[in-house]
Structures are given as structure tokens and as C-alpha cells.
């Protein structure tokens, strides 16, 4: 059960084309977002659609593979863990973000036609 303590599995569509970034000492990073669409009936019985965006990061050979094979709009299944990260903007504001650090990614659908 210990491997269930920080585990995330989602299926969604890639929001932007992942880009490779070299961060020193040969480490490769890619960041992108995925959109998860949900539909539900509200109290009045009308269907509502919402989209939740999740930030994703991948390192190493997984990052390389994603950059060469994943396009914007492709449906993917991801598995990873939640990671909290803090940073400071150019204006000196402190911000924090929760990202999903990928363990694996699987393409499950092709890009939607526009």
C-alpha cells in the first residue's frame, strides 16, 4: 500500500505541445498541461461542462520521448505523483504551483479535428 500514498492517474488532452528544456548537467525537462473535461447535471437538471487544467512535468528519457511523440490535442493517460513547487516572478512575487511529476504516459487517442 505504500506506493499508493502519492499517486495520480488521469486521462485528458494535451493543451500545448511539450517542449524540451535542458536544465544543466545533461538533465532534460519538459512541461505541458492537460485538460480534463467533465459533464454533470446541475440542480435544475441542465447539463454543465467544466474543464480542469493540470500542469505536468517529465524528466530524462521520458521527457525526450514525450517531446518527440506528443502533440497538442492528443488524448493521453498519465500516471505520476503530485509535487509542490515555489518560485518567484520577475516582479518579485512569490508563487506556488502543484504539478504532476510523470512516471509514465500513454497515448490513448489521436488529436481532435478542429
Image (spheres, rainbow, N blue to C red):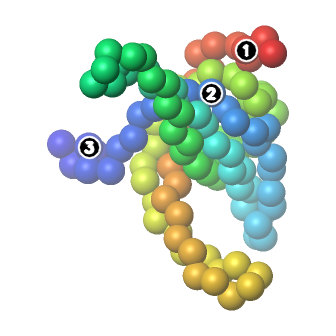
Residue nearer the viewer, 96 or 2: 96
Image quarter where the C terminus lies is top right
> Do callouts 1 and 2 mark residues in contact (Cβ within 8 Å)?
yes
* Secondary element at image label 3: helix
Residue nearer the viewer, 32 or 113: 113
Tell me where residue 113 sits by quadrant: top right
Tell me where residue 46 sits by quadrant: top left
- The residue depicted at 78 percent of the width and 28 percent of the height is 71
Mark 3 residue crowding within 10 angstroms, few (<14) / some (14–19) / many (20+):
few
Residue with the mark numbered 2: 13
Q: Which mark is residue 112?
A: 1
Relative to 75, 20 lies left or right: right
Total numbered labels placed on residues in the image: 3
Residue with the mark numbered 3: 4
Disc 1 or 3, which lies upstream in sequence?
3
Residue 50 in the image: state x and y as whole percent: 49, 31
Residue 14 in the image: state x and y as whole percent: 67, 32
Q: CA distance from mark 1 to mark 3?
A: 32 Å
Query: Relative to 87, is 84 above or below?
Result: above
> Do callouts 2 and 3 mark residues in contact (Cβ within 8 Å)?
no
Amino acid at each position: 500500500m505504500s506506493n499508493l500514498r502519492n499517486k495520480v492517474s488521469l486521462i485528458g488532452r494535451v493543451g500545448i505541445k511539450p517542449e524540451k528544456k535542458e536544465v544543466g548537467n545533461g538533465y532534460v525537462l519538459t512541461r505541458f498541461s492537460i485538460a480534463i473535461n467533465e459533464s454533470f447535471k446541475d440542480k435544475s437538471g441542465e447539463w454543465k461542462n467544466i474543464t480542469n487544467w493540470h500542469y505536468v512535468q517529465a524528466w530524462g528519457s521520458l521527457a525526450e520521448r514525450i517531446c518527440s511523440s506528443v502533440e497538442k490535442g492528443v488524448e493521453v493517460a498519465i500516471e505520476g505523483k503530485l509535487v509542490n513547487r515555489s518560485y518567484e516572478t520577475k516582479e518579485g512575487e512569490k508563487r506556488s504551483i502543484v504539478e504532476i511529476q510523470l512516471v509514465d504516459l500513454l497515448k490513448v487517442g489521436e488529436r481532435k479535428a478542429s
